[in-house]
């Protein structure tokens, strides 16, 4: 083989290696996002169950709190939203990784009845 053929082969292998590395890093980033989203959803579900167990009518104002799960602190808040039927109220819940984060990791809505 000539030097030119060897250099072309090295370029082809280098490009293939970069493509594999990019795919692997995107996969790892996706796994991290999926883990964070799953844990935030669990925190939200725990808070919704807690609200239902307390049996209190949701207030219109935001109620805030925090919880630790999987070694990480999660910040949640919820508030009641009036519906057309006075016997039902929507309960919106948001979970964030920081107390004043701009966008929540997850949001949920459920309905509670009197």
Image (tube, rainbow, N blue to C red):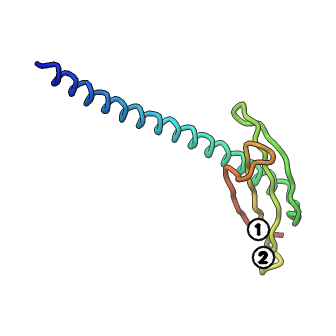
| Numbered circles on residues, count | 2
Among the 4 quarters of the image, the one containing residue 70: top right
Q: Position of residue 28 (x, y in %)?
A: 50, 35
Does residue 88 appear to the left or right of 57 in the view shown? left
* Element class at badge 1: strand
Q: Earlier in the sequence, mark 1 or mark 2?
A: 2
Tags 1 and 2 touching, CB below 8 Å: yes
Q: Which quadrant is home to the C terminus?
A: bottom right
**Residue plotted at (82% across, 61% down):** 79
On the image, numbered disc 1 is attached to which residue?
A: 90
At label 2, counting other C-alpha atoms closer than 10 Å, the crowd grade (few under 14, some 14-19, many 20 or more) is few
Q: Residue at x 75, y 57 (%)?
A: 93
112 vs 25, nearest the viewer: 25
Work out which residue is located at the far left of the displayed protein and give it.
Answer: 1
Q: Viewer-proximal residue, 17 or 38?
A: 17
Q: Is residue 17 above or below residue 80?
A: above
Using the image as rendered, state which of residue 11 and residue 34 is in the foreground: 11
**Which residue is under mark 2?**
83
Quadrant of the image occupied by residue 56: bottom right
Q: Position of residue 40 (x, y in %)?
A: 68, 45
For the point 79% across and 80% down, which residue is it? Answer: 85
Numbered mark located on residue 10 in the image: none
Give coordinates of residue 53: x percent, y percent.
82, 54
Residue at the extreme bottom: 84
Q: Quadrant of residue 82?
A: bottom right
Q: CA distance from mark 1 to mark 2?
A: 7 Å
Give 106 or 10, whichever is nearer the viewer.
10
Side (left or right) of 79 relative to 46: right
């Amino acid at each position: 083989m000539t030097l030119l053929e060897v250099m072309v082969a090295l370029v082809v292998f280098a490009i293939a290696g970069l493509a594999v590395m990019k795919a692997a890093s995107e996969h790892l980033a996706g796994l991290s996002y999926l883990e964070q989203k799953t844990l935030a959803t669990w925190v939200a579900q725990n808070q919704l169950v807690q609200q239902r167990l307390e049996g209190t009518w949701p207030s219109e104002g935001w109620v805030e709190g925090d919880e630790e799960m999987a070694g990480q602190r999660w910040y949640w808040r919820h508030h009641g939203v009036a519906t057309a039927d006075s016997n039902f109220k929507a309960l919106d819940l948001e979970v964030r990784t920081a107390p004043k984060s701009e966008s929540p990791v997850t949001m949920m809505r459920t309905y509670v009845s009197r």
